[in-house]
Image: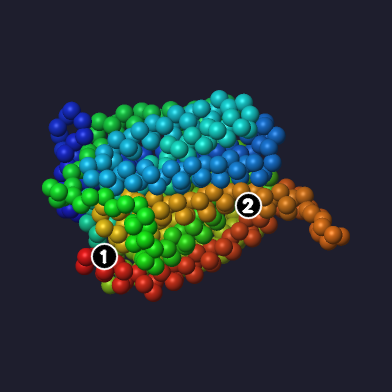
Amino acid sequence: MAGSTPLDAALPAAGPQRRPVSVNYVVGLLFLVYLLNYLDRQIVNILAEPIKQELGLADWQLGLMTGLAFALFYTVLGIPLARYADRPGADRSRLITVCLAVWSAMTALCGLATGFLQLLAARIGVGVGEAGCSPAAHSLISDLVPKAQRATAMGVYSLGIPLGKLVGMAVGGVVAQAVGWRMAFLAVGLPGLALAVLTWFTLPRPQPVSATPPAQARFVPVLRELAKVRTFWWVSLGGAFMSFVSYGQTAFLGSFFIRVHGLTVGEAGVALGLSMGLAGAVGTWFGGRMADRAARTDQRAYVLIPAAAAGLGGVVFAAAVLAQSPAAALAILAFAGVLNAIWYGPVFATVQGLVPPEQRATAAAVHLFVINLVGLGLGPLAFGGLSDLLNSGWTFGGLGFAGLGPRQGLRVALLMGSGLAFLALAAFWRAGRTIRGELEDQHAS
């Protein structure tokens, strides 16, 4: 984004100091907030195996803790918090700051849990805090960044996803190996409280462009309007399938490398963090930049590029799971990480472009509700349940099969789940039929 005049525009500062800040600073600071958002959300994945051993949990309990319990509160509370962010004069910067402080404190509390229910309650608290972050941040970025550069800006913000995974996997694995999984939660939770202080004093609160901003529409009429926007629902469905596969696989990749390839928790954390985190960062950045450039000629690029990446990513991930050596698996997994991260910037930008400014946070919250309830809520739980089933086997009415054991059971579960990437391909491809007309309709209104 450097060197682009619109993104270098100055904004008023948030706190008592009056020096202006640039749009680049705002997007960069929101990226750091989102990095901690994803770090605190995902660190439990690399800690799953030591938690499982100490607390005596089954894989389905790990899936519940990493997915459904978090996602229910994260997605449901996201909508009322987004409605607040869309109100005329709403202080989105303060909302983001308070949410950051809450989820960081709850992440630290995970390290003090002595049983499954306590840990589950703390994870729910993390979900409550994180619910208000992305809808408000998406709305704020969309107000500040020109439409032609919005996918790039959303890509920069979304770099928090892969880099949050990198830091969470690496730091979580190393700290857990050295001093235990409880200290790992404390190590990543406490820095968020310090960042909350920085955002409170430096994240600007831009004023509406119009002196008399439009009144906030009621929620049900907004949903009725969204219901008519077919592209919105197709990209939400595509994102839901991608998230189902991504969250489900990521929740158990640490366990996979520990069980199948014999890595320690520290080795698995560093290896997966570097492999998936760096690769995902490349894919996220490249996806936003490539979509913005290709869309100058054809706006269908915002969905057709994610469609192609989804299908190829599913095939490459399957090859990584089948690899016989950890080095080969990690190398192939890095390629899959690039492909599976390409959709973030283009899809998030598409959602923001399909609605008027006063509905952007609400549209983002509904979009995130769909993709996270399906992906984050059901993905880890489904992968964990399938792993348990394939591990132990089953019998019913004289039919059934012998269990594959914890190693091969998890491998087959990951393989079976990767096929859902083709459903994401189909949904994104279908969105290509309507995206041009609906983006043009919104631009003309």
Residue 109, percent across and down? 51, 27
**Camera-side mark, 2 or 1:** 1
Q: Indicate the quadrant where residue 65 lies.
A: top right
**Residue named by callout 2:** 383
Q: Which residue is drawn at 54% across and 28% down?
A: 111
Q: Is mark 2 on a helix, strand or loop?
A: helix
Residue 302 placement (x, y as % from top left): 36, 65
User: Badge 1 local density, few (<14 within 10 Å), some, or many (20+)?
Assistant: few
x 73%, y 52%: residue: 389
x and y percentages locating residue 307 in the rendered image: 45, 67
**Disc on the earlier residue, 2 or 1:** 2
SS for callout 1: helix
Position of the C terminus by quadrant: bottom left
Report the disc number at residue 442: 1
Q: Residue at x 18, y 53 (%)?
A: 6
- The answer to whether residue 184 of the structure is visible from this angle is no
Placement of 169 over or under 368, stated as above or below: above
Task: Give above or below for 216 relative to 308.
Answer: above
Q: Which amino acid does label 1 sit on?
A: Gln
